[in-house]
Amino acid sequence: MLGRKQNNILVIKTDGLRGFVAADPYFEAIRDAYPKAKISLLTTQGLQRIARASPYFDQVAAMPNMGDREARKEFVRQLKASKFERVYDLSGDAAARRLRSAMGPFRPKWFAAEQALKPNPKSAQPLPLPNLEKISELSGLSVDDRLPDLRWAVSARKDSANMQPSWYGISGPFGLLLPSEDGARRWSASGYAGLARQMAESGFMPVLAGSKNLHGFGDEIANEAPQLLDLSGKTDHLQLAALAQEAAFFVSDVSDEMQLALSVGCEGAVICPAKSPYYAEGRHIVTLTAENDLGAIEPSFVWRTLDNMGLINNAHSDQLVAEAR
Protein backbone atom coordinates (compact mmCIF):
# COMPACT_ATOMS: atom_id res chain seq x y z
CA MET A 1 0.00 0.00 0.00
CA LEU A 2 1.20 3.51 -0.81
CA GLY A 3 2.07 5.64 2.22
CA ARG A 4 -0.65 6.19 4.77
CA LYS A 5 -4.15 4.88 4.38
CA GLN A 6 -6.20 6.95 1.93
CA ASN A 7 -9.92 7.56 2.45
CA ASN A 8 -11.17 9.00 -0.83
CA ILE A 9 -9.57 8.45 -4.24
CA LEU A 10 -10.84 9.86 -7.54
CA VAL A 11 -10.01 8.23 -10.89
CA ILE A 12 -10.75 10.06 -14.14
CA LYS A 13 -11.16 8.10 -17.39
CA THR A 14 -13.17 9.97 -19.99
CA ASP A 15 -11.45 9.22 -23.32
CA GLY A 16 -13.76 6.51 -24.63
CA LEU A 17 -14.10 2.74 -24.76
CA ARG A 18 -10.64 1.89 -26.07
CA GLY A 19 -9.00 4.06 -23.44
CA PHE A 20 -11.14 2.49 -20.73
CA VAL A 21 -10.15 -1.03 -21.82
CA ALA A 22 -6.46 -0.14 -22.04
CA ALA A 23 -6.50 1.33 -18.52
CA ASP A 24 -7.72 -1.90 -16.90
CA PRO A 25 -4.29 -2.78 -15.38
CA TYR A 26 -4.13 0.71 -13.86
CA PHE A 27 -7.62 0.39 -12.39
CA GLU A 28 -6.49 -2.80 -10.67
CA ALA A 29 -3.24 -1.21 -9.48
CA ILE A 30 -5.09 1.69 -7.86
CA ARG A 31 -7.50 -0.67 -6.09
CA ASP A 32 -4.62 -2.85 -4.88
CA ALA A 33 -2.76 0.23 -3.61
CA TYR A 34 -5.76 1.45 -1.60
CA PRO A 35 -7.76 -1.65 -0.61
CA LYS A 36 -9.75 0.12 2.11
CA ALA A 37 -10.33 3.42 0.33
CA LYS A 38 -13.52 4.61 -1.28
CA ILE A 39 -12.57 4.87 -4.95
CA SER A 40 -14.75 6.92 -7.29
CA LEU A 41 -14.56 6.88 -11.08
CA LEU A 42 -15.40 9.86 -13.25
CA THR A 43 -16.11 8.69 -16.79
CA THR A 44 -18.45 9.22 -19.74
CA GLN A 45 -22.19 8.64 -19.75
CA GLY A 46 -21.89 5.65 -22.09
CA LEU A 47 -19.26 3.87 -19.99
CA GLN A 48 -21.06 4.05 -16.67
CA ARG A 49 -22.76 0.66 -16.82
CA ILE A 50 -19.65 -1.35 -17.61
CA ALA A 51 -17.66 0.67 -15.06
CA ARG A 52 -20.21 -0.12 -12.34
CA ALA A 53 -19.75 -3.83 -13.05
CA SER A 54 -16.02 -3.63 -12.34
CA PRO A 55 -14.46 -4.75 -9.04
CA TYR A 56 -12.36 -1.59 -8.81
CA PHE A 57 -14.77 1.25 -8.01
CA ASP A 58 -17.18 2.02 -5.20
CA GLN A 59 -18.89 4.84 -7.03
CA VAL A 60 -19.20 5.84 -10.70
CA ALA A 61 -20.32 9.21 -12.09
CA ALA A 62 -20.31 10.94 -15.49
CA MET A 63 -18.20 13.99 -16.28
CA PRO A 64 -20.48 17.01 -16.74
CA ASN A 65 -20.23 19.47 -19.60
CA MET A 66 -17.13 21.38 -18.54
CA GLY A 67 -18.02 24.12 -21.00
CA ASP A 68 -21.17 24.92 -19.02
CA ARG A 69 -20.04 27.42 -16.36
CA GLU A 70 -22.85 26.75 -13.89
CA ALA A 71 -22.64 22.95 -14.24
CA ARG A 72 -18.88 23.15 -13.78
CA LYS A 73 -19.14 25.27 -10.65
CA GLU A 74 -21.70 22.94 -9.06
CA PHE A 75 -19.66 19.86 -9.92
CA VAL A 76 -16.46 21.35 -8.49
CA ARG A 77 -18.35 22.20 -5.31
CA GLN A 78 -19.44 18.56 -4.99
CA LEU A 79 -15.90 17.29 -5.59
CA LYS A 80 -14.47 19.60 -2.96
CA ALA A 81 -17.10 18.43 -0.48
CA SER A 82 -16.04 14.82 -1.12
CA LYS A 83 -12.53 15.67 0.15
CA PHE A 84 -10.58 13.47 -2.24
CA GLU A 85 -7.01 12.96 -1.12
CA ARG A 86 -5.61 11.82 -4.45
CA VAL A 87 -6.74 12.11 -8.06
CA TYR A 88 -5.52 9.83 -10.84
CA ASP A 89 -6.29 11.43 -14.19
CA LEU A 90 -5.89 8.57 -16.67
CA SER A 91 -7.25 10.61 -19.58
CA GLY A 92 -5.10 13.69 -19.81
CA ASP A 93 -7.73 15.28 -22.05
CA ALA A 94 -9.09 18.82 -22.18
CA ALA A 95 -12.05 18.11 -19.87
CA ALA A 96 -9.79 16.64 -17.17
CA ARG A 97 -7.34 19.52 -17.43
CA ARG A 98 -10.19 22.01 -17.15
CA LEU A 99 -11.46 20.24 -14.06
CA ARG A 100 -8.00 20.33 -12.48
CA SER A 101 -7.79 24.06 -13.07
CA ALA A 102 -11.28 24.63 -11.68
CA MET A 103 -10.37 22.82 -8.46
CA GLY A 104 -7.97 25.66 -7.64
CA PRO A 105 -4.68 25.76 -5.75
CA PHE A 106 -5.93 23.67 -2.81
CA ARG A 107 -6.92 20.69 -4.93
CA PRO A 108 -5.97 17.11 -3.96
CA LYS A 109 -2.65 15.54 -4.92
CA TRP A 110 -3.11 15.21 -8.68
CA PHE A 111 -1.39 12.68 -10.96
CA ALA A 112 -2.16 13.22 -14.65
CA ALA A 113 -1.45 11.19 -17.76
CA GLU A 114 0.62 12.77 -20.49
CA GLN A 115 -1.53 14.03 -23.34
CA ALA A 116 -1.99 11.70 -26.28
CA LEU A 117 0.05 12.46 -29.39
CA LYS A 118 -1.76 14.09 -32.26
CA PRO A 119 -3.18 11.41 -34.58
CA ASN A 120 -1.77 10.79 -38.03
CA PRO A 121 -4.76 11.24 -40.38
CA LYS A 122 -3.17 8.89 -42.92
CA SER A 123 -2.69 6.06 -40.44
CA ALA A 124 -5.11 3.19 -39.95
CA GLN A 125 -3.84 2.72 -36.43
CA PRO A 126 -6.27 3.59 -33.61
CA LEU A 127 -6.05 7.12 -32.25
CA PRO A 128 -3.11 7.45 -29.84
CA LEU A 129 -3.89 6.95 -26.16
CA PRO A 130 -2.44 9.04 -23.31
CA ASN A 131 0.83 7.87 -21.78
CA LEU A 132 0.14 6.51 -18.29
CA GLU A 133 3.71 5.55 -17.36
CA LYS A 134 4.40 8.95 -15.79
CA ILE A 135 1.52 8.39 -13.36
CA SER A 136 2.98 5.15 -12.04
CA GLU A 137 6.44 6.69 -11.77
CA LEU A 138 5.33 9.79 -9.84
CA SER A 139 2.73 8.14 -7.62
CA GLY A 140 4.55 4.89 -6.90
CA LEU A 141 1.80 2.69 -8.32
CA SER A 142 2.89 -0.86 -9.04
CA VAL A 143 1.21 -1.77 -12.34
CA ASP A 144 1.32 -5.34 -13.63
CA ASP A 145 2.67 -5.73 -17.15
CA ARG A 146 -0.37 -7.54 -18.46
CA LEU A 147 -2.98 -7.27 -21.18
CA PRO A 148 -6.37 -5.76 -20.35
CA ASP A 149 -8.68 -8.48 -19.04
CA LEU A 150 -12.32 -7.44 -18.79
CA ARG A 151 -13.81 -10.87 -18.18
CA TRP A 152 -15.17 -9.36 -14.96
CA ALA A 153 -17.58 -7.44 -17.20
CA VAL A 154 -19.27 -10.70 -18.11
CA SER A 155 -19.13 -12.54 -14.79
CA ALA A 156 -20.62 -9.58 -12.91
CA ARG A 157 -24.09 -10.00 -14.46
CA LYS A 158 -23.87 -13.23 -16.41
CA ASP A 159 -27.28 -14.41 -15.21
CA SER A 160 -29.16 -11.37 -16.53
CA ALA A 161 -31.45 -12.20 -19.44
CA ASN A 162 -30.23 -9.27 -21.52
CA MET A 163 -26.67 -10.56 -21.26
CA GLN A 164 -27.55 -13.74 -23.18
CA PRO A 165 -27.30 -14.13 -27.01
CA SER A 166 -30.87 -15.45 -27.03
CA TRP A 167 -32.06 -12.01 -25.88
CA TYR A 168 -31.30 -10.81 -29.42
CA GLY A 169 -32.67 -13.88 -31.17
CA ILE A 170 -29.24 -15.46 -31.62
CA SER A 171 -29.16 -19.26 -31.62
CA GLY A 172 -26.30 -21.55 -32.54
CA PRO A 173 -22.80 -20.39 -33.43
CA PHE A 174 -22.36 -16.77 -34.44
CA GLY A 175 -19.60 -14.36 -35.39
CA LEU A 176 -19.27 -10.67 -34.64
CA LEU A 177 -18.70 -8.06 -37.33
CA LEU A 178 -17.18 -5.00 -35.65
CA PRO A 179 -16.62 -2.24 -38.23
CA SER A 180 -14.90 1.03 -37.41
CA GLU A 181 -16.99 4.20 -37.29
CA ASP A 182 -14.36 5.87 -39.47
CA GLY A 183 -15.41 5.20 -43.05
CA ALA A 184 -11.94 6.00 -44.35
CA ARG A 185 -10.43 3.15 -42.32
CA ARG A 186 -13.24 0.65 -42.81
CA TRP A 187 -13.57 -2.48 -44.90
CA SER A 188 -16.26 -2.11 -47.55
CA ALA A 189 -19.95 -2.86 -47.01
CA SER A 190 -19.77 -5.35 -49.89
CA GLY A 191 -16.85 -7.06 -48.16
CA TYR A 192 -18.75 -7.44 -44.91
CA ALA A 193 -21.85 -8.52 -46.84
CA GLY A 194 -19.97 -11.21 -48.73
CA LEU A 195 -18.55 -12.52 -45.47
CA ALA A 196 -22.00 -12.42 -43.85
CA ARG A 197 -23.42 -14.56 -46.66
CA GLN A 198 -20.55 -17.04 -46.32
CA MET A 199 -21.13 -17.20 -42.57
CA ALA A 200 -24.84 -17.85 -42.98
CA GLU A 201 -24.26 -20.56 -45.60
CA SER A 202 -21.85 -22.26 -43.18
CA GLY A 203 -24.24 -22.18 -40.22
CA PHE A 204 -22.96 -19.05 -38.45
CA MET A 205 -25.25 -16.14 -37.72
CA PRO A 206 -23.58 -12.87 -38.82
CA VAL A 207 -24.05 -10.27 -36.08
CA LEU A 208 -23.07 -6.62 -36.56
CA ALA A 209 -22.34 -4.70 -33.35
CA GLY A 210 -21.20 -1.21 -32.47
CA SER A 211 -22.61 2.24 -31.86
CA LYS A 212 -25.75 3.67 -33.43
CA ASN A 213 -23.51 5.60 -35.83
CA LEU A 214 -23.02 2.32 -37.72
CA HIS A 215 -26.71 1.83 -38.43
CA GLY A 216 -26.53 3.29 -41.94
CA PHE A 217 -23.52 1.12 -42.74
CA GLY A 218 -25.43 -1.86 -41.35
CA ASP A 219 -28.27 -1.10 -43.74
CA GLU A 220 -25.81 -1.19 -46.65
CA ILE A 221 -24.60 -4.62 -45.57
CA ALA A 222 -28.13 -5.93 -44.98
CA ASN A 223 -29.18 -4.85 -48.48
CA GLU A 224 -26.69 -7.38 -49.85
CA ALA A 225 -26.89 -9.88 -46.98
CA PRO A 226 -30.39 -10.05 -45.44
CA GLN A 227 -29.11 -12.77 -43.09
CA LEU A 228 -27.35 -10.06 -41.08
CA LEU A 229 -28.52 -9.35 -37.54
CA ASP A 230 -27.83 -5.64 -37.07
CA LEU A 231 -27.35 -4.76 -33.39
CA SER A 232 -25.70 -1.38 -33.99
CA GLY A 233 -26.83 0.93 -31.22
CA LYS A 234 -28.74 -1.88 -29.48
CA THR A 235 -26.12 -3.10 -27.02
CA ASP A 236 -24.23 -1.29 -24.30
CA HIS A 237 -20.61 -2.16 -23.58
CA LEU A 238 -21.51 -4.69 -20.90
CA GLN A 239 -23.83 -6.56 -23.25
CA LEU A 240 -21.28 -6.44 -26.05
CA ALA A 241 -18.65 -7.95 -23.77
CA ALA A 242 -21.01 -10.84 -23.04
CA LEU A 243 -21.70 -11.38 -26.75
CA ALA A 244 -17.98 -11.28 -27.57
CA GLN A 245 -17.20 -13.95 -25.01
CA GLU A 246 -19.83 -16.24 -26.58
CA ALA A 247 -18.95 -15.48 -30.23
CA ALA A 248 -17.00 -17.99 -32.31
CA PHE A 249 -14.87 -15.18 -33.76
CA PHE A 250 -14.84 -11.53 -34.75
CA VAL A 251 -13.89 -9.66 -37.92
CA SER A 252 -13.00 -5.98 -37.59
CA ASP A 253 -11.00 -3.13 -39.07
CA VAL A 254 -9.61 -1.81 -35.77
CA SER A 255 -12.72 -0.51 -34.00
CA ASP A 256 -12.97 0.37 -30.32
CA GLU A 257 -15.44 -2.49 -29.93
CA MET A 258 -12.74 -4.88 -31.17
CA GLN A 259 -10.56 -3.88 -28.21
CA LEU A 260 -13.36 -4.85 -25.86
CA ALA A 261 -13.83 -8.17 -27.67
CA LEU A 262 -10.12 -8.94 -27.37
CA SER A 263 -10.17 -8.16 -23.65
CA VAL A 264 -12.71 -10.94 -22.96
CA GLY A 265 -10.87 -13.53 -25.03
CA CYS A 266 -12.61 -13.30 -28.42
CA GLU A 267 -10.39 -14.20 -31.38
CA GLY A 268 -10.51 -13.24 -35.02
CA ALA A 269 -9.23 -11.33 -38.02
CA VAL A 270 -8.31 -7.66 -38.36
CA ILE A 271 -8.37 -5.86 -41.72
CA CYS A 272 -6.14 -2.80 -42.26
CA PRO A 273 -3.81 -1.10 -44.76
CA ALA A 274 -0.35 -2.59 -45.26
CA LYS A 275 1.26 0.75 -44.40
CA SER A 276 -0.45 0.76 -40.99
CA PRO A 277 -0.65 -2.86 -39.79
CA TYR A 278 -2.28 -3.60 -36.47
CA TYR A 279 -0.36 -5.50 -33.80
CA ALA A 280 -1.81 -7.16 -30.71
CA GLU A 281 0.94 -9.14 -29.04
CA GLY A 282 -0.42 -11.92 -26.87
CA ARG A 283 -3.77 -12.12 -28.68
CA HIS A 284 -4.93 -14.83 -31.10
CA ILE A 285 -5.60 -12.66 -34.15
CA VAL A 286 -4.48 -12.54 -37.75
CA THR A 287 -3.99 -9.20 -39.51
CA LEU A 288 -5.01 -9.05 -43.17
CA THR A 289 -3.60 -6.14 -45.16
CA ALA A 290 -4.08 -4.47 -48.53
CA GLU A 291 -1.70 -2.04 -50.21
CA ASN A 292 -4.26 0.64 -51.00
CA ASP A 293 -7.95 -0.28 -51.15
CA LEU A 294 -9.22 -2.46 -48.29
CA GLY A 295 -12.00 -3.55 -50.64
CA ALA A 296 -9.36 -5.65 -52.42
CA ILE A 297 -9.49 -8.11 -49.53
CA GLU A 298 -11.95 -10.80 -50.58
CA PRO A 299 -14.53 -12.19 -48.13
CA SER A 300 -13.51 -15.72 -49.14
CA PHE A 301 -9.94 -14.97 -48.04
CA VAL A 302 -11.16 -13.71 -44.67
CA TRP A 303 -13.25 -16.85 -44.26
CA ARG A 304 -10.32 -19.13 -45.10
CA THR A 305 -8.21 -17.25 -42.57
CA LEU A 306 -10.77 -17.85 -39.82
CA ASP A 307 -10.88 -21.52 -40.84
CA ASN A 308 -7.07 -21.80 -40.75
CA MET A 309 -7.13 -20.25 -37.26
CA GLY A 310 -9.33 -23.13 -36.11
CA LEU A 311 -12.22 -20.83 -35.23
CA ILE A 312 -14.84 -22.38 -37.50
CA ASN A 313 -14.53 -26.10 -36.92
CA ASN A 314 -14.02 -25.57 -33.19
CA ALA A 315 -17.21 -23.55 -32.97
CA HIS A 316 -19.22 -26.25 -34.71
CA SER A 317 -17.76 -28.89 -32.40
CA ASP A 318 -18.67 -26.85 -29.34
CA GLN A 319 -22.21 -26.44 -30.64
CA LEU A 320 -22.63 -30.17 -31.19
CA VAL A 321 -21.43 -30.86 -27.65
CA ALA A 322 -23.87 -28.28 -26.26
CA GLU A 323 -26.80 -29.79 -28.19
CA ALA A 324 -25.91 -33.28 -26.98
CA ARG A 325 -26.15 -32.25 -23.31
Image: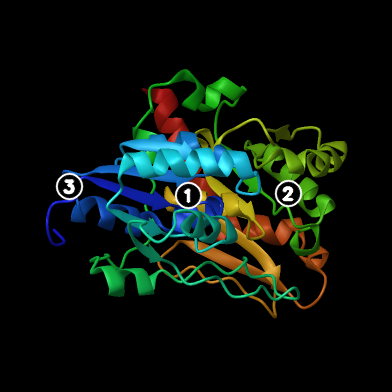
Tell me which amino acid carries mark 3: Pro
- The residue that label 3 is drawn on is 35
Q: Looking at the image, which residue is at 77% across and 78% down? A: 291
Sequence-earlier tag: 2 or 1: 2
- Residue extending furthest front? 105
Secondary structure beneath disc 3?
A: loop
Residue 89: which quarter of the image? bottom left
- Distance, label 2 to label 1, CA atoms, is 18 Å
- The residue that label 2 is drawn on is 195
- Distance, label 3 to label 1, CA atoms, is 31 Å
Q: Is residue 259 above or below residue 241?
A: below
In the rendered view of the protein, which quadrant contains the C terminus? top left
Secondary structure beneath disc 2?
A: helix
Q: Looking at the image, which residue is at 56% across and 21% down? A: 167
Q: Nearer the viewer, residue 249 or 325?
A: 249
Q: Nearer the viewer, mark 3 or mark 2?
A: 3
Q: Is residue 4 above or below residue 134?
A: above
Q: Position of residue 108 (x, y in %)?
A: 33, 56
Circle 1 crowding by C-alpha within 10 Å: few under 14, some 14–19, many from 20: many
